[in-house]
Image (cartoon, grey):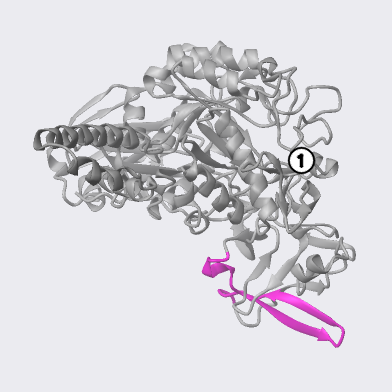
Amino acid sequence: MPSTDDSDTSPEKLKLRYHRRQKPTKMSSRVPQTISNTSDAMNKLIYSFIFIVFVFSSERVLSEIHASIPPRGWNSYDSFCWTISEDEFLQNAQLISQKLHAHGYEYAVVDYLWYRKLVPGAYVDSLGFDVIDEWGRMSPDPRRWPSSKGGKGFKEVAKKVHDMGLKFGFHIMRGISTQAVNANTPILDITTGKAYTEAGKVWHAKDIGLKERSCGWMKNGFMSVDTTLGAGRAFLKSLYHQYAEWDVDFLKHDCVFGDDFELSEITIVSEILEGLNRPILYSLSPGTSATPVMAQQVSTLVNMYRVTGDDWDNWGDVAAHFDVSRDFAAASMIGGGGLLGNSWPDLDMLPLGWLTDPGVNVGPHRLSRLTLDEQKTQMTLWSMARSPLMFGGDMRKLDDETYRLITNPTLLEINSFSSNNKEFPYITNTAEFQFLKQGPHFQTRSLKDTGASEKLILGLSSCHDSKAKGWFVRVVDADLEQVCWRWPSRSKNFEPFCLYKSDPLLQSDEVTYREKYRGKLHLHARNRDGFCFDTSSKRKLTSKEHKRASFFPCRPDANQMWELNSNGTLVNSYSGSCASIKETKANAGPGGVRSWIATGKKGEVYLAYFNLNTSRTIISTTISNLSKAFPMINFGSCSCKEVWSGKDYGSLQHSLSASVESHGVALFILTCS
């Protein structure tokens, strides 16, 4: 039975790909001369020794294949936001080692702003409270991370985590910090240990920082660096070599993907990590508005990439993952080739157990607001979609129910070793009370909501998407032009959506800067002088929220600069994404039923029914429909057991039906002869 998600990433092909990317050793050039000067007996000994060394080194190299299965671990964000201390982190790491490591949770990850001082006035997007070294690189706040004193960084923390049998990771942001640019720190040349010099010039942070390309949701925090400059690349190299010196195993790179797409930086960072003698897992975040088309540009460069906004403990966020996980599975992105191994679409952390609120400094602390059924739904979807599993609750308050959920052996087996994972559309459903009154008269599920009015959203998508092509110029008068969107699916008589164009504001008189943005546009809404079409977000978005372009006071930011191409795409200068008009349904909340299917490594079939409705629902499928998913399997010879209830359904007959709680899930294991 062919696999849809690992045809190019079998162990043999991964090994071959890995070895091809390794630098050749010089041993082979020296061996012939050594052997020619020895006896035949000695030759055999040497050949035997070389063979043993080769086998040993091969096994060592192969054991370092990155993310051969979806990574699993713990991240501090959901329970501490940015304010976690060294003591709190190590307490959690110790409990991960004791309670979760045996279940495959191996990474302990510090989330963002570990370099920010926890003092009055400091918050997520404050400026001037960060600890940076003489080269403009972030350093752990020594008051929160005492072992970092004396320039040690995370070296001591990493050692303690490694001594627990775990791997250590932390969160990083795009480019360079605004604080470093304002201080105009010199750039380190790691080859000399001195300031980077090129063309007789000593380069500084202001030479490489692109203020017009600041992080959309943390504008005071970080901005892109000019990767076309040797100094820009030298700065990035100094960062990641320092992280390797701290013995990091996992890096979560934020504000470079999705709406904040920064392909050049991702590419350079990937090349730097590949060249290190220390294996480091490379993860991208947050991924708002990410699509399979966009992900295909980065999947081979990384090991994980977020495909949604932040996931929090509300049902809307859980339900928002069904469409996106379906799309990435259909595009065969699950377990594709990645940086020295595999890459995985990441549905974000699991907000279960003891949590805090997003964007706060300290507290409030509380239990997850998801019901137990909703938590089972989330954990099952994450496992069926083979997303990385990163638990977010405070380990010091891990309750038995949450522990049983995140260590469920069937879910972890599915997450690690299943294949052919995909949405299963051949299901029928009816509300349980209708079933009891009328009998099993099911209606086929439809993904289209009925009875809802249309709503138009001016949003962003990948420029490779054919749906992004539809913009054209319309002349209003001699001095005024519009950029308009032509409706591909509407009548020619339907009035197009139009924006008024003007030359952009520019913040610099430098020739290179003005040349870079020559031909770019500012776009205005009708009767909104001084307000420009903008892609920036004032905060991190949750999974249920969709990034929408908005109108803000005009600024000399790349977020507000656009270029109309001859192919009908309208490209944003900040993210490289394209503007498009989308039709959606007003007031269309998450509802209906969904299903996923996959195969196990022993030939078993996993089938999950998800009820997104607000009432208990009967969900059903037939043997003939199951055969549409996997024609090679004889479903008439299957026995069936449901995981959450433990119910044994016996031999599968004509159909398989289950009553599923509101926002709940039924997970079946089909064993077929």
> Disc 1 marks which amino acid?
Gly
Residue 468 is covered by the magenta coloring: yes
Q: Position of residue 59 (x, y in %)?
A: 28, 33
Task: Specify whether 99 is left or right of 215.
Answer: left
Dot 1: element:
loop
Q: Which residue is mark 1?
A: 221
Q: Residue at x 68, y 46 (%)?
A: 175
Query: Can residue 212 be seen in the rendering of this structure?
Result: no
Q: Position of residue 334 (x, y in %)?
A: 39, 46
Q: Residue furthest front?
A: 37
Q: Quadrant of the C terminus?
A: top left
Residue 644 is covered by the magenta coloring: no
Query: Can residue 642 be seen in the rendering of this structure?
Result: yes
Q: Position of residue 389 (x, y in %)?
A: 46, 31
Is the residue marked by circle 1 packed among few (<14), some (14-19), or many (20+) residues within 10 Å? many
Task: Specify whether 272 is left or right of 16.
Answer: right
Q: Which residues are magenta?
A: 463-490
Q: Residue at x 44, y 28 (%)?
A: 376
Task: Specify whether 310 is left or right of 497.
Answer: left
Q: Residue at x 16, y 46 (%)?
A: 633
Q: Position of residue 597 (x, y in %)?
A: 31, 42
Task: Specify whether 614 is left or right of 551.
Answer: left
